[in-house]
Image (cartoon, rainbow, N blue to C red):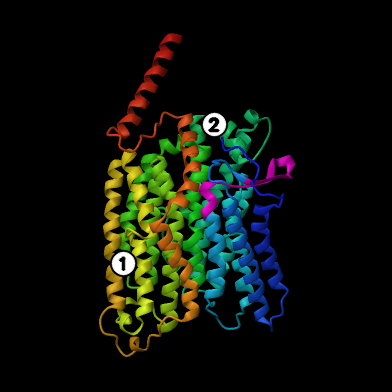
């Protein structure tokens, strides 16, 4: 299961390795450019990021939607005595996250000017962005636990410096809080992954950090698997972030430069939700099912809490930050519902949230650059003086709400449809989050864009052509995925089905089919039957 298979590419070009190496080479090259010629740094950054984006599109074109295993696999020994290898692969679960990363960074580089402090230049800013891109791509592509941890940690450093160096008033506090939270969470994962490799060595004939080998042949005992699962889960829960480990996120978003917020919301937060799927459910399916009520409860609380907190915000950027907590709660809900529909919806919603919320942060950044404020009370009447800007904001906002016909709807619909079968009451609670999302976003839009503009807002500039060109890919993605999501789901669902089959294989869990009236009862009945069989065997032995 999940065995590595050969790439469909006509050549032996190491595509996945190139996706990581190209931005790294770009970051290093920028450091050697002359400070007096900042245009060279921008050119190198664009060349590296656009090349990486083009490679992700090539990967998407060559991806075999009928293959549910890992594709374009690269596997080379790295530190053999420790069982560490350069093992990369992509499947339907990671495919569109990789493509989103490849396309988001060039848009952030070309469309957003950094917020400069005294004596700052573009060189380190662009170098950190490219290093961040390499780390994110490496995390999504790694099939070796140690390699994943390495990239998972690498992303902390550039984001820390981007927030601390190019952020706003309280940037040092926000950067330090972000780093401490995520670094401490990662410490648990480091202990867990080392323990995983060494505990499984007798079963596998030696120490290995290979994800596929550990998932297929680890055979961890129930108690051991649960402890190891929580070691990984703490790191992923902080990164998502799951309530109540979320407090770093509003500060980080509010103080980060616009590009930092776009990347953080677009792809970095998905390292947590992706980690739950790729490593939590795949490595420790029994522990994931056993802890299901905990994660469903935290997801439901996060959905409601994030929505209520967003409604109370006075800062527009902070409002969008709290909305992310609510949306990511839906993704966690779908992940731990353990049905193909819910998990497919979660994977799709990771991409949709990256597009919609990334675009919202981009638009909020444009508002700040024009008005030098994000306070909702100081804005108003913008629609009268900048109708095109208001229309674009409206489309992106409606996609975040989940209006049918836009990308946010189909992901939430699949999550709620699939989760209702196995997590009925949690899903009922989570549905209130959909209503609250409409409340806080529409109310914010009304206050910012409706009414009569005052003297300051009457000077609000209309959307520029260059800004429109940057926003067009977001709008196209929002409409296309909302109207015709089939191409995405055709590539996501086979890998999700395989993961669900793997979770069911060694567990008492049976995922119900859509339309089943029994739903969770089927799961409980299966557990009781299994327990009766175990009891009968014990009596027979006695």
What is the secondary structure assignment of the residue under circle 2?
loop
Q: Which residue is mark 1?
A: 441
Mark positioned earlier in the residue sequence (1 or 2): 2
Q: What are the residue bounds of the magenta stretch?
A: 72-96
In the picture, the quarter occupied by the N terminus is top right
Question: Mark 1 against mark 2, which lies toward the viewer?
Answer: 1
The reply to whether the C-beta atoms of the residues labelled 1 and 2 are less than 8 Å apart is no
Q: Is residue 169 visible?
A: no
Does the magenta-highlighted stretch encompass residue 83? Answer: yes
**Residue beneath the point at 41% across and 68% down:** 360
| Label 1, label 2: how far apart the Cα atoms are | 46 Å
**Residue beneath the point at 59% across and 62% down:** 53
- Depth order, front residue of 78/161: 78
Q: Residues within 10 Å of mark 1 (few under 14, many from 20)?
A: many
Q: Is residue 13 left or right of residue 253?
A: right
Q: Quadrant of residue 408?
A: bottom left
Up-down: is 533 above or below 385? Answer: above
Q: Residues within 10 Å of mark 2 (few under 14, many from 20)?
A: some
Q: Quadrant of residue 454?
A: bottom left
Q: Which residue is mark 2?
A: 220
Q: Give how far across and how far down residue 92 sits, in percent.
A: 52, 47
Q: Residue furthest bottom?
A: 455
Does the magenta-highlighted stretch encompass residue 409? Answer: no
Q: Give how far across and how far down residue 486 sits, in percent.
A: 43, 51
Q: Give how far across and how far down residue 535 sits, in percent.
A: 39, 16
Q: Is residue 195 left or right of residue 499?
A: right
């Amino acid at each position: 299961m999940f065995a590595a298979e050969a790439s469909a590419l006509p050549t032996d070009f190491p595509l996945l390795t190139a996706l990581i190496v190209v931005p790294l080479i770009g970051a290093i090259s920028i450091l050697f450019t002359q400070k007096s010629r900042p245009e060279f740094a921008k050119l190198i950054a664009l060349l590296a990021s656009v090349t990486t984006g083009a490679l992700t599109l090539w990967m998407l074109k060559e991806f075999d939607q009928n293959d549910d295993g890992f594709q374009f696999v690269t596997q080379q020994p790295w530190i053999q005595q420790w069982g560490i290898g350069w093992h990369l692969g992509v499947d339907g679960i990671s495919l569109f996250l990789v493509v989103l990363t490849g396309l988001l960074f060039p848009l952030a580089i070309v469309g957003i000017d950094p917020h400069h402090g005294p004596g700052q230049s573009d060189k380190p800013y662009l170098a950190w962005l490219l290093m961040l891109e390499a780390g994110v791509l490496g995390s999504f592509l790694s099939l070796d636990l140690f390699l994943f941890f390495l990239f998972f940690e690498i992303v902390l450093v550039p984001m820390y410096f981007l927030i601390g160096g190019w952020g706003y008033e309280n940037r040092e506090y926000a950067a330090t809080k972000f780093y401490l939270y995520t670094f401490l969470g990662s410490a648990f994962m480091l202990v867990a992954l080392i323990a995983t490799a060494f505990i499984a060595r007798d079963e596998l004939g030696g120490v290995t950090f290979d994800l596929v080998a550990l998932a297929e042949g680890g055979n961890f005992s129930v108690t051991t698997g649960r402890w190891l699962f929580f070691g990984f889960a703490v790191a992923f829960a902080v990164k998502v972030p799951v309530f109540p480990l979320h407090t770093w996120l509003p500060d980080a978003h509010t103080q980060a430069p616009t590009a930092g917020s776009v990347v953080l919301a677009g792809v970095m937060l998905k390292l947590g939700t992706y980690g739950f799927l790729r490593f939590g459910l795949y490595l420790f399916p029994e522990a994931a099912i056993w802890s299901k009520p905990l994660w469903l409860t935290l997801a439901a609380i996060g959905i409601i809490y994030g929505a209520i907190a967003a409604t109370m915000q006075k800062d527009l950027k902070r409002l969008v930050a709290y909305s992310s907590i609510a949306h990511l709660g839906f993704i966690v809900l779908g992940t731990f519902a353990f049905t193909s529909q819910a998990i497919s919806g979660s994977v799709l919603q990771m991409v949709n949230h990256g597009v919609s919320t990334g675009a919202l942060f981009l638009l909020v950044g444009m508002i700040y650059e024009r008005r030098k404020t994000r306070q909702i009370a100081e804005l108003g009447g913008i629609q009268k003086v900048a109708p095109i800007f208001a229309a674009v904001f409206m489309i992106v906002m409606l996609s975040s709400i989940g209006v049918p016909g836009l990308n946010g709807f189909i992901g939430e619909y699949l999550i709620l449809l699939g989760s209702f079968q196995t997590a009925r009451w949690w899903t009922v609670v989570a549905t209130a989050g959909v209503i609250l999302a409409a409340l806080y976003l529409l109310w914010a839009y009304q206050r910012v864009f409706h009414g009569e503009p005052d003297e300051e807002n009457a000077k609000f500039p209309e959307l520029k052509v260059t800004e429109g060109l940057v926003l067009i890919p977001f709008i196209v993605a929002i409409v296309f995925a909302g109207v015709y999501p089939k191409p995405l789901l055709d590539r996501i669902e086979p890998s999700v089905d395989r993961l669900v089959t793997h979770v069911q294989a060694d567990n008492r869990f049976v995922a119900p089919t859509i339309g089943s009236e029994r739903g969770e009862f089927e799961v409980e009945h299966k557990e009781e039957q299994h327990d009766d069989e175990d009891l009968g065997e014990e009596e027979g032995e006695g």
